[in-house]
Amino acid sequence: MSHDVSEDGWSPQGPVTELSDAASWDLLRGRTFGRLGLSQDDRPEIYPVNFICDGESILFRTAEGSKLRELTHNRHVVFEADAETNGGVWSVILKGQAEVLTVDPVLTEEALAAFPAWVPTQAFVYVRITADTLRGRLFEHHLPIGHL
């Protein structure tokens, strides 16, 4: 992946910490809502998705429709999740390949609980995103005294 050690940086917005891959995956494991970016009819599109981390991949479910149709034509996707913290925000962006699973994965009750109990109008299909690159960053809201 892209970052193996945490390193401090700076941006015009303030201090930014590049997170290690392990720290980025840990943050993703603590969330269940993110955004899937893909190309639809050669134009960018973003979809909100509920997800779980399955090892070092992202797993979400969807139903038949434009999102699933596009994933079968172009497997290259971007996935992003973020959250606010006491002192700032973090963001993890994963670029990778999506695979529509032909068999439903075996999931624990805890993993299944991450997915909302929607009333299905169509059968769910599971999709796994395997990372090519992963980038996590922590943005601080308050400037340390030494940077003024």
Image (tube, helix red, strand yellow):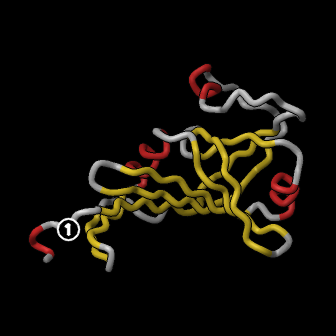
Position of 91 compared to 116: left or right?
A: left
Q: Of all residues shown, which one is farthest toward the bottom? A: 12
Residue 51 placement (x, y as % from top left) = 62, 41
Q: What's the amino acid at mark 1? A: Leu
> Which one is nearer the viewer's eye here, 127 or 102?
127
> Which one is nearer the viewer's eye here, 23 or 115?
115
Residue under label 1, please give it: 143
Q: Residue at x 78, y 31 (%)?
A: 104
Q: Is residue 118 above or below residue 51?
A: above
Position of 62 compared to 46: left or right?
A: right
Position of 129 compared to 68: left or right?
A: left
**Mark 1 Cα shell of 10 Å, populated few (<14), some (14-19), many (≥20):** few
Q: Residue at x 75, y 30 (%)?
A: 118
Quarter of the image where the C terminus is located: bottom left
When asked about the image quadrant of residue 107, the answer is: top right
Residue 131 placement (x, y as % from top left) = 59, 56
Q: Of all residues shown, which one is farthest toward the left? A: 146
Residue 144 placement (x, y as % from top left) = 15, 66
Residue 70 placement (x, y as % from top left) = 84, 60
SS class of the residue under badge 1?
loop
When asked about the image quadrant of residue 101, the answer is: top right
When asked about the image quadrant of residue 18, the answer is: bottom left
Q: Residue at x 43, y 59 (%)?
A: 136
Q: Is residue 58 above or below residue 3?
A: above
Q: Residue at x 70, y 26 (%)?
A: 106
Please give the count of numbered marks on the rendered protein: 1
Q: Is residue 35 above or below residue 73?
A: above
